[in-house]
Image (tube, rainbow, N blue to C red):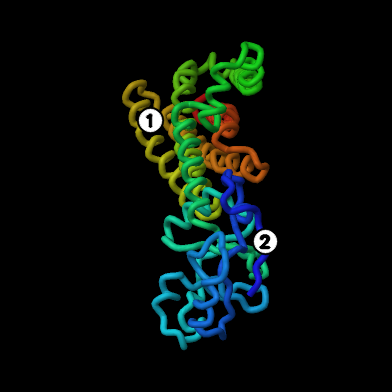
Amino acid sequence: MPSESTPDPTAPVEPLGVAVEHATTRVPLARPEQAVGEVRDGLADSSFESADAIAVLAASALVGLVPIERLLAAPADVRIADVMDADPPVVGPGEDQEVVAWKMVRHGETLAVVDDEGGFRGIVPSRRMLDVLLSEHDEDLARLGGYLASTKRARRASEEPVGRRIWHRLPWLLIGLAGAMASVAIVGAFEEELDRKVLLAFFIPGVVYMADAVGTQTETLLIRGLSVGVTVRGVVGRELMTGAAMGMILGAAFLLFAALAFGDGRVAVAVALALLASCSIATVVAMALPWSFQRLGIDPAFGSGPLATVIQDLLSIAVYFAIAVPIAT
């Protein structure tokens, strides 16, 4: 069966982003009714970019894959339909390259790219996924080191002039400054209540910090999951329950501490309820922002963290006063 032409297979391949950009149609093709011997003989006079597997097509739809090892070992008179994998691992054309690499490693076999109608868009050669894995490894190491997205960008960032340094950092700092101003305004709005019950002010930092900590854990878990193909829908229920459970545990601990240390049961109950609510809300914010950033095509590892901190802090303060003032004053 003829195959579509593609660029020179010997040219270096740069990681491009999505599955279809790594796929090639210069692979062995077969029909389900063909004999193994016929397909095997056809390999001798052809040139392929990847011969790890034979793509079995019915019209233009992929119906199976035959690993080259299985083709070589099968009797010549057996039909391709009898030796093919009728349910091979496949990915969509727009699947992220890191997810494709992860699936290939997990399944340990060739991946095919098919569209929504099942149309064959190519096979992803394993050597291309090695390029992706190396690139993603470099990027992950750069992130762990506090760099931007790669070692090259990290070097540029460390050598750029003062003006560009300010330009890259100032927007996020301005967001944080706006959040700080807003938090001052919220606390100021409850000045009379704090004058009547100064003890309430003691617990604001603790509530804000614990909500941030719970949110950061959720955000880290979700960003890692998104990078390997886990969907928000797949973790949202369990993570919401986890956030609420953590809020209850932390609230109970604070309840005991506040009651024993300050002898005010009403304040202790208010702080405990505020922790439950703020930790639950922080979990929602920590899941919503990375998901939104990913939908917008923005790397969630960079932008969602600072923005989530600002939003979580403001909501935690607001929730704390909304709960504590009616109960404790």
**What amino acid type should be assigned to the residue bearing mark 2?**
Ser
- Give the camera-side residue of 164 and 289: 164
- Give the camera-side residue of 189 and 174: 174
- Residue 226 vs 84, above or below: the answer is above
Q: Position of residue 11 (x, y in %)?
A: 59, 47
Question: Which residue, given by chain and number where applicable, does mark 1 sit on?
Answer: 254
Q: Position of residue 146 (x, y in %)?
A: 48, 26
Q: Secondary structure at mark 2?
A: loop
Q: Secondary structure at mark 1?
A: helix
Camera sees residue 106: yes
Quadrant in which the N terminus appears: bottom right
**What amino acid type should be assigned to the residue bearing mark 1?**
Phe
Q: Position of residue 10 (x, y in %)?
A: 56, 50
User: Callout 1: 10 Å neighbours few (<14), some, many (20+)?
Assistant: many
- Residue 290 vs 164, above or below: the answer is below
Q: Residue placed at 37% from the left, 36% from the top?
A: 252
